Image: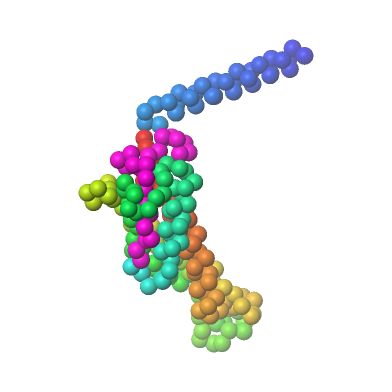
Amino acid sequence: MDAIFKAFRNTLISGLAALSLAAVLTSGGCAYHLGSAGRSIPGGSKKISVPVFKNSTQEVGIEVSFTNALIQEFQRSRVARIVDNSLSEVSVVGMIERVQYLPGAKRLSGDSATPLMPLGTALASEYRILLTVTVKVIRQSDGAQLWKGSFNGERTYQAPQVTLAGVNSLNPLYNLSARRQNIDLMANDLMLEVHDRITENF
């Protein structure tokens, strides 16, 4: 019983020591604040607006995904309240600068994995999406730029497969659907990063 009690006591002491160390590390002025505690908008604004992102690419409609994703991040963190543009102290303005699609791995005719492909053909089996988005925080009272950041995203997805297994279709409807789904996922990831960068506080 003594051995069990000693082991329990040592474990308890170790746990308390770890908690004390964590408290010391996070109490310093330069420690990164976890969660939304200690985060703030540049200038300390509490009411912000997020207009629909501008889209300089040929990919029509994706600006809605980015705008909604950023609004959801602010609503989740409650760092600031989303209000109408006419009532906001600052505006978080986004621009989708670039969307690029690059074919990745290819399947070539004559490959043992694709024996039914016509001779002389090559089909892309995956695509890579590259995205560039810029975001600014603008003070409404005088139009001053309080913050600016540029964000790059990259994602690879498998080309949709139809009919024969192992042979990838270049059907534009299938590919468009897969492309949009992946852009939506990229929007969520990038806007989480945007939110954290705008509100980070050391």
For the residue pair 2 and 162, the one nearer the viewer reads as 162
For residue 192, side relative to residue 49 (left or right): right
Q: Name the residue at the bottom extreme.
A: 119
Quadrant where the N terminus sits is top right
* Residue 121 visible in the current orientation: yes
In terms of depth relative to the viewer, which is nearer, 43 or 48? Answer: 48
Residue with the most extreme right position? 1
The residue segment tinted magenta is 33-55
Residue 113 seen in the current view: no
Q: What predominant SS class does the magenta segment belong to?
A: loop
Indicate the colouring scheme: rainbow
Residue 2 lies, in percent from the top left, at: 74, 12
Is 10 positioned to the left or the right of 178 in the image? right
Residue at image location 32% in from the left, 53% down from the top: 86
Percent x, y for residue 50? Answer: 38, 54
Q: Residue at x 45, y 23 (%)?
A: 24
Q: Position of residue 190 (x, y in %)?
A: 43, 54
